Image: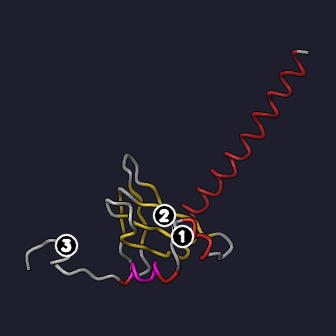
Amino acid sequence: MARRLLQILFYAVFLVGCAGVNRWCSSCSASALGADWVVVKNDLNGKPFRCWTLTGTSVTSETQSDGIYWKSPDGHLVHIAGNYDYVQVVNGEWDKALGELGLTKELCRSLQERQFTAEQLGLPN
């Protein structure tokens, strides 16, 4: 009886562990080899403020921080922290990934192209 209970416990841990291992492998692979991502930075009210669509990019969590970083196609190292969300795009399904964040291609593109004036940012001219 005890042996049977131990077998059941082993299989339960194994099954739960497989999901964790699969997630870990996906995360390691995306960090090391790059993947497609949608990243959105939200303002203090939770509204999308900036949006990035990243292709073949390694997005990495900063150690001892709430931030992430990646290298842009033009060579800039981009760091963001705070109120942001990101989703890995799987099988080229950009619309689905954007939908996970409540965005559309058009809205993300608009946020990418957004330019600010000193007045909008509350800065002196």
The image shows residue 108, relative to residue 9, as above or below, that is below
Side of 15 where 75 appears, left or right: left
Mark 3 burial class by Cα count in 10 Å: few <14, some 14-19, many 20+: few
Front-lying residue, 119 or 6: 119
Mark 2 falls on what kind of element? loop
Mark 1 falls on what kind of element? strand
- At label 2, the amino acid type is Val
Residue 11 in picture, x, y percent from top left: 82, 34
Q: CA distance from mark 1 to mark 3?
A: 28 Å
Predominant secondary structure in magenta? helix
- At label 1, the amino acid type is Trp
Q: CA distance from mark 2 to mark 3?
A: 28 Å
Q: Comparing marks 1 and 3, which lies closer to the viewer?
A: 3
* Image point (49%, 83%), residue name: 106
Q: CA distance from mark 1 to mark 2?
A: 8 Å
Tell me if label 1 and label 2 are in contact, CB under 8 Å. Answer: yes
* Image point (36%, 68%), residue name: 78
Mark 3 falls on what kind of element? loop
Mark 1 burial class by Cα count in 10 Å: few <14, some 14-19, many 20+: many
Front-lying residue, 16 or 32: 16
Q: Which residues are magenta?
A: 107-112
Residue identifier under label 1? 37
Classify residue 4 by image quadrant: top right
* Image point (71%, 40%), residue name: 17
Residue identifier under label 3? 121
| Res 59 label | 2
Side of 5 where 99 appears, left or right: left
